[in-house]
Image (spheres, helix red, strand yellow):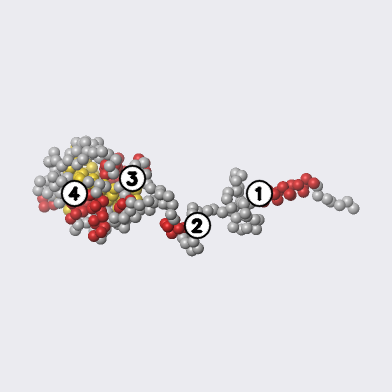
């Protein structure tokens, strides 16, 4: 009887397949090691036998987060400006807060001029920060930022005395502050905050239940400042705008105001100032710092308005010192 013997070609193919399997395994791995990486399905390099983290690696039971927090490496300091955006409302939750915060983040990314840290708490309002960062951006306090934007974070922030001093010193020593809408309705029992911002909200008498968003006639007083230079001398914006107190034209440079000749004040005499002088946007110096504030931006639709977006974007650039001047120049009503 004739025996069926394997052909030489079949044997060679079997050996070649076995060698190919061995070569495909990562270095140091074996065919029975179930912890080896998945089989390579594209390209020719199988990759390393194990994936290593920078440094010695986590201790037994140590989390990756804790490992990188304590890892000593060379510095990785930010190269662009950093903006802390505070959106933690403590009084009225404006539906524009999320839109405004996201806007500040997007405007910085799109321009390449700043990165934004978005917070609805106030833990970063403290004097810490300014040290090297080893694994990305992990801010410790105001020392890690160049400006603060208050995105309608109204009400009492309940800051400690140390936190209050840190914020005042932050601006006074040369950093920037931009206050959007509801930020004028914050910290009414903290006079130094009001003095730093330039004014405080006391009402919006032109906005009613029947007409919650009012078409405000506005006048442009400062056509040299980048945040308002593009506005016409007179224009209209639908919004909820405030009347303010604890301010003086000797202290702030008014950029925009409500056109007092074109709004009805009959019946609300006690809710508007007797001289009908109602600023809507202004800048001021606070020590060596730069402050911009505006009551524009009540609605989330406002942050889709190219003019409002441009106004706040230019204000942030100025607060960051990316725009050189003009410096605030208080002036009589124009």
User: 10 Å neighbourhood of mark 4: few (<14), some, or many (≥20)?
Assistant: many
Counting residues from the start of the chain, the first of labels 4 and 3 encountered is 3
Instruction: Residue at the far left: name it.
Output: 274
Q: Residue at x 11, y 52 (%)?
A: 270
Circle 1 sits on which residue?
A: 23
Nearest the camera: 118 or 257? 118
Circle 3 sits on which residue?
A: 81
- Where is residue 88, by image quadrant? bottom left
Q: Is residue 271 rendered to the left or right of residue 98?
A: left
Counting residues from the start of the chain, the first of labels 1 and 2 encountered is 1
Work out whether residue 97 can be spotted: no
Horizontal and vertical percent position of residue 139: 35, 53
Q: CA distance from mark 1 to mark 2?
A: 28 Å
Counting residues from the start of the chain, the first of labels 2 and 4 encountered is 2
Vertical relation: 39 (above or below) 159: above
Q: Give the SS element for disc 1.
A: helix
Horizontal and vertical percent position of residue 195: 18, 51
Horizontal and vertical percent position of residue 177: 25, 48
Nearest the camera: 42 or 258? 42
User: 10 Å neighbourhood of mark 2: few (<14), some, or many (≥20)?
Assistant: few
């Amino acid at each position: 009887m004739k025996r069926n013997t394997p052909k030489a070609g079949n044997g060679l193919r079997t050996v070649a397949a076995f060698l190919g399997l061995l070569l495909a395994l990562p270095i140091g791995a074996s065919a029975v090691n179930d912890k080896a990486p998945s089989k390579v399905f594209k390209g020719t390099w199988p990759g390393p036998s194990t994936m290593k983290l920078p440094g010695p690696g986590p201790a037994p039971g140590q989390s990756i987060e804790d490992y990188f927090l304590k890892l000593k490496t060379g510095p990785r300091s930010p190269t662009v400006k950093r903006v802390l955006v505070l959106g933690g409302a403590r009084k009225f939750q404006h539906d524009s807060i999320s839109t405004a915060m996201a806007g500040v983040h997007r405007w910085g990314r799109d321009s390449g001029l700043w990165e934004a840290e978005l917070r609805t708490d106030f833990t970063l309002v403290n004097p810490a920060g300014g040290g090297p960062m080893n694994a990305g951006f992990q801010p410790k306090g105001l020392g890690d930022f160049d400006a603060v934007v208050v995105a309608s974070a109204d009400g009492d922030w309940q800051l400690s005395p140390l936190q209050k001093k840190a914020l005042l010193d932050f601006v006074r020593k040369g950093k920037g502050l931009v206050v959007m809408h509801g930020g004028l309705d914050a910290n009414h029992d903290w006079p130094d905050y009001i003095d730093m911002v330039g004014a405080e909200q006391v009402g919006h008498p032109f906005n009613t239940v029947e007409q919650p968003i009012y078409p405000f006639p506005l006048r442009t007083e400062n056509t040299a400042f980048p945040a308002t230079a593009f506005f016409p001398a007179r224009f209209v914006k639908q919004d909820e705008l405030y009347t303010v107190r604890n301010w003086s034209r000797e202290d702030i440079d008014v950029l925009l105001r409500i056109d007092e000749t074109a709004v009805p004040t009959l019946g609300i005499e006690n809710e508007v100032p007797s001289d009908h002088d109602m600023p809507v946007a202004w800048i001021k110096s606070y020590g060596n710092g730069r402050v911009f504030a505006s009551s524009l931006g009540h609605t989330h639709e406002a942050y889709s308005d190219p003019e409002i977006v441009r106004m706040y974007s230019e204000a942030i650039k100025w607060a960051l010192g990316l725009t050189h001047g003009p410096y605030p120049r208080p002036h009589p009503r124009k």
